[in-house]
Image: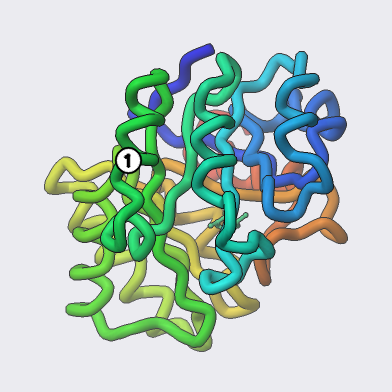
């Protein structure tokens, strides 16, 4: 399978690949949260769904559930699957020695989403720009998820998203939390290339996510593609 990030792509985030049929109507791909799954490599071996996969094995130190032992090795195995079109590697991990994982993914035709998460707040504009530039340089897509507490926080994130996208960088941004929720719907208009949503709200993988059908509808309406 192949999928690029030259346009906005909506990912259904899940720890259970059996949810894929339910995501087909709305999503372009599935984000498989390996760190939240019981036997992720077995699940990947048995995957015969239609949607391509973005595999994430989120480190505990970046808000996920994966123990460090074997974490990157599992991500590398994942990248070898034909259905896996991308893997997510944290920028901090890449800068700390995970470049071989990035290279391995590329060798197997998978793109790399280099990610940064701030679960505490939204940095200053300058710092946001630095973080997103580092992410974009480290991967094929630079992803930045912050926690917004105000409209000003969301504006800074959207502004940096727009500036980087206008320079030609491939970026994905979102603000977590209640105050940031609407950025998930509007960030694509400012150049963000990936949105994340659970099939059902109770299985959210980050604070403030819309469910998949809702985000798909909002993005389509705002982009003028829904025909309404
Ligand atoms: O990094 C991201 C973005 C995310 O944190 C979000 O805010 O939608 C959801 C995660 O599943 C994904 O790995």
- The coloring applied to the image is rainbow
- Residue 25 image-quadrant placement: top right
Residue at image coords 82%, 40%: 16
Residue 186 position (above or below residue 30) = below
- Residue 146's spot in the image, x, y percent? 46, 73
- Residue 209 image-quadrant placement: bottom right
Residue picked out by circle 1: 100
- Residue 151's spot in the image, x, y percent? 45, 82
Q: Nearer the viewer, residue 112 or 76?
A: 76
Q: Quadrant of ligand 1?
A: bottom right
- Residue 91's spot in the image, x, y percent? 34, 59
Quick one: which residue is furthest to the left in this view?
Answer: 167
Q: Nearer the viewer, residue 227 or 161?
A: 161
Residue at image coords 27%, 60%: 95
- Residue 81 image-quadrant placement: top right
Quick one: which residue is furthest to the front in this view?
Answer: 69
Q: Nearer the viewer, residue 5 or 83?
A: 83
Residue 221 appears in the picture as rendered: no
Residue 144 is left or right of residue 61, and the answer is left
Residue at image coords 68%, 64%: 65
């Amino acid at each position: 399978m192949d999928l690029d990030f030259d346009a906005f792509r909506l990912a259904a985030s899940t720890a259970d690949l059996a949810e894929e049929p339910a995501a087909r109507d709305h999503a372009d791909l599935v984000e498989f949260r390996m760190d939240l799954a019981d036997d992720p490599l077995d699940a990947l071996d048995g995957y015969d769904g239609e949607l391509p996969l973005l595999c994430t094995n989120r480190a505990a130190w970046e808000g996920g559930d994966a123990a460090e032992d074997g974490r990157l090795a599992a991500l590398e195995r994942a990248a070898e699957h034909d259905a896996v079109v991308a893997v997510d590697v944290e920028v901090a991990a890449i800068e700390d020695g995970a470049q071989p994982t990035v290279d391995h993914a590329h060798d197997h035709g998978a793109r790399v989403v280099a990610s940064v998460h701030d679960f505490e707040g939204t940095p200053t504009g300058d710092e946001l720009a630095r973080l997103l530039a580092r992410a974009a340089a480290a991967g094929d897509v630079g992803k930045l998820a912050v926690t917004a507490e105000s409209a000003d926080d969301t504006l800074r994130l959207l502004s940096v998203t727009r500036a980087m996208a206008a320079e030609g960088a491939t970026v994905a941004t979102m603000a977590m939390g209640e105050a940031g929720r609407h950025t998930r719907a509007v960030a694509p208009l400012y150049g963000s290339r990936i949105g994340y949503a659970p099939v059902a709200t109770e299985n959210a993988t980050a604070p403030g996510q819309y469910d998949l059908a809702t985000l798909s509808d909002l993005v389509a309406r705002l982009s003028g593609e829904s025909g309404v």
